[in-house]
Amino acid sequence: MNEAMKMTDFGADVFGAEAIKEYLPKDTARKLQGTIEKGEPLDASIAGEVAHAMKHWAMDRGATHYTHWFLPMTGSTAEKHDSFLEIKNGEPIMAFSGKNLIVGEPDASSFPSGGIRSTFEARGYTAWDPTSPAFIKRHGNGATLCIPTAFCAYTGEALDKKTPLLRSMQALEKSVKRLMKLFDLPDAHAGCTLGAEQEYFLVAKKYWEKRPDLVMTGRTLFGAASAKGQQLEDHYFGTIPVNVLDFMNDVERALWKLGIPAKTRHNEVAPAQFELAPQFEELNLASDHNMIVMDTLKSVAEKHNLKCLLHEKPYAGVNGSGKHNNWSVSYGGRNLLDPGSNPQENAIFLTVLCAVIEAVDKHADLLRAAVAGAGNDHRLGANEAPPAVISIYLGDQLAQVVDMIEKGVTGETKEAGVLKVGVDTLPPLPRDATDRNRTSPFAFTGNKFEFRAPGSSVCCSGPMTVLNTIVAESVERIAEELEKSGTAGKAKKGEHTVAFHAALQEILQKSLAAHKRVVFNGNGYEALWLEEAKRRGLPNFPDTPGALAALTKKENAALFEKYGVMTKRELKSRHEIFLEEYDKKIHIEGACARDIAAGMIAPAVKAEYLETAKAYEAANAVGVSSGIAALRESLVELGAGLDALKTGVQKLDEALALSDNAAILAAMQALRTTADSLERKVADSRWPLPKYREMLFLY
Ligand code: ADP
Ligand code: MG
């Protein structure tokens, strides 16, 4: 039974502003809030007091254990629990020190490190991230205090997904501050925001259990299309099935308690596919929250006899799942991608917009690399939106504005129809919900960019780290040019000089001329676009190994190093980890496909063959001629199928032995084609795997 969700539950299990006020002395509370809100360095002397308060707060909520919660390179979250219990002078006490809060020393030897962690030094360190609040994780009969942390080697090199994200945010803040100063704005905090829309599939647990492919790989490696798929377009935004709504309610209640603002829920395009979207938050927090959202979806599904599939492509022939990363930059609380309502706000908006266009064009390869993975290869570059070519959708209105800036002339006179940055007021840009281009990988949607290429299973921090870093670079470059122009810093009462406007105009004009090729407002599905993209010189990497090569380029290593986001070694280690992960996943898929084909499908086909042969013999024995032809034909078909399965399994075995990914994928596909056609020739009662029509419609 559902108890009602209550407003007062929101954030009840988070050591946030309210808990801080209640459990900490005023002075300490103020210092801690300064770190959380303004990113001020943490005053180490308050750690003891904060730990003490946190322990009491957590124990009041039933917690007996604490854990440093971190994001290793596996792509999921990690936790090692310790109890508060300590025996002192023979007496049990509950203890939690400042040191316990600030650092942990989990054994790092079993986490991927890509060569960073040397074998003789297995220790890793977790370091408290005070900008993401501690929370309580509830589980059946207990509760654990979770402390979000960064995870690094004893050398200080990052072994996780959070550390580079935090560094990239710092880099972007530095660049944005430098630019805002030139617009004569007072010093303020520059931050980024993220709203991550999470797509997922639900499948009945009873079917999932009978699908080794779903259990092992997260996607179906076999399965003929069901008669009905998504062709009637009746699922998207349709009435949410009652049991799914119950599930969603339970998910949301859990998320609300953790202060995660789950806001929107709806049916997605494919049958059995759904979406959860939270309200956007500060980037690091939103990224952590998305990890908790994924965990919560999975754990709550169990209680509803469901399984939540976060794989990018659980089913062939219907849409896959993505994770739209809605991203923006703010300064002093104002969203810089909001076009604004006066010339100065407009000018800032257009400057940041141009910086993003420049960054995306210059570093499309890095953005592509950041979303690469075995699962996402079935979306990007595989006849599904978005394509693997990174381009920007601006919408007609904004594209026109950008066009006008690019064509504009510098000088003091205003020609008809030519927009001068910072002089003219932008025409109002309607946030047109009907004119959404769903095929673009990187779309401007009114007051933010929506990066749609990330797959449903990934941690947001990877793509966001790249985006922050490349925008930090372009913002800095524009700021530098503006500084060189010698026109900045001379505004009077917020009014900039004509020379400043002219300089800005020229900088943006040049940037757009060089980078507008990345802007594409058409249909990204069309094959014509791929040709056009090629003509424009935009990179296209349809698969993971090709995409990841961007991480090995010297200039990219230099970029990350320059902005203090990753050292050369850290980047190299990531390249190794991602490639290895890809190899392993493909190998697991191949081995799993072979096992299913040889151990489940072939025996079912043999049984069908035997039964058909018996019927054929029986018909012959009694001398009946009707049915003989059909039985004979079936026998030939089933026999041919068996032969094809046999050679298919052999081919796959060979490819697996060679560890040749492309060959493994091709052999798996060939085997699948054989098996899927046999699925229609074998008695339904005999087929060993739950079918698409069951998994996609009966949940
Ligand atoms: P959609 O039609 O794509 O669902 P929404 O307007 O509902 O568009 O927004 C999708 C996501 O974008 C939500 O998570 C929302 O909170 C987030 N979002 C809105 N404004 C911003 C912003 N300034 N920065 C980051 N994310 C934002
Ligand atoms: Mg969206």
Image (cartoon, rainbow, N blue to C red):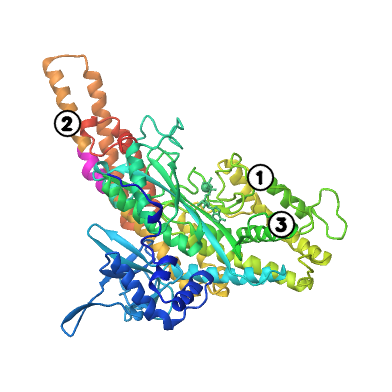
Name, please, the residue furthest toward the right. 413
Disc 1 target residue: 430
The magenta segment: 593-603
Q: Nearer the viewer, residue 161 or 489?
A: 489
Q: Contact, CB < 8 Å: mark 3 with mark 1?
A: no
Q: Quadrant of residue 514?
A: bottom right
Question: Where is residue 62 drawn, in percent x and y?
Answer: 27, 64
Residue type at the position of mark 2: Leu
Question: Where is residue 688 drawn, in percent x and y?
Answer: 23, 38
Crowd tier of the residue under label 2, counting other residues whose Cα lies within 10 Å: few below 14, some 14–19, many 20 or above: some
**Looking at the picture, does residue 216 appear above or below residue 90?**
above
Name, please, the residue furthest toward the bottom. 89
Disc 2 target residue: 610
Name, please, the residue furthest toward the left. 621
Q: Earlier in the sequence, mark 2 or mark 3?
A: 3
Crowd tier of the residue under label 3, counting other residues whose Cα lies within 10 Å: few below 14, some 14–19, many 20 or above: many
Q: Nearer the viewer, residue 12 or 552?
A: 12
User: Mark 2 or mark 3, which is nearer to you?
Assistant: 3
Crowd tier of the residue under label 1, counting other residues whose Cα lies within 10 Å: few below 14, some 14–19, many 20 or above: few
Residue 242: say if magenta: no
Question: The residue tagged with tag 2: helix, strand or loop?
Answer: helix
Label the magenta part by its dominant secondary structure.
Answer: helix
Q: Locate the C terminus by quadrant.
A: top left
Disc 3 target residue: 346
- Residue 281, label in figure: none
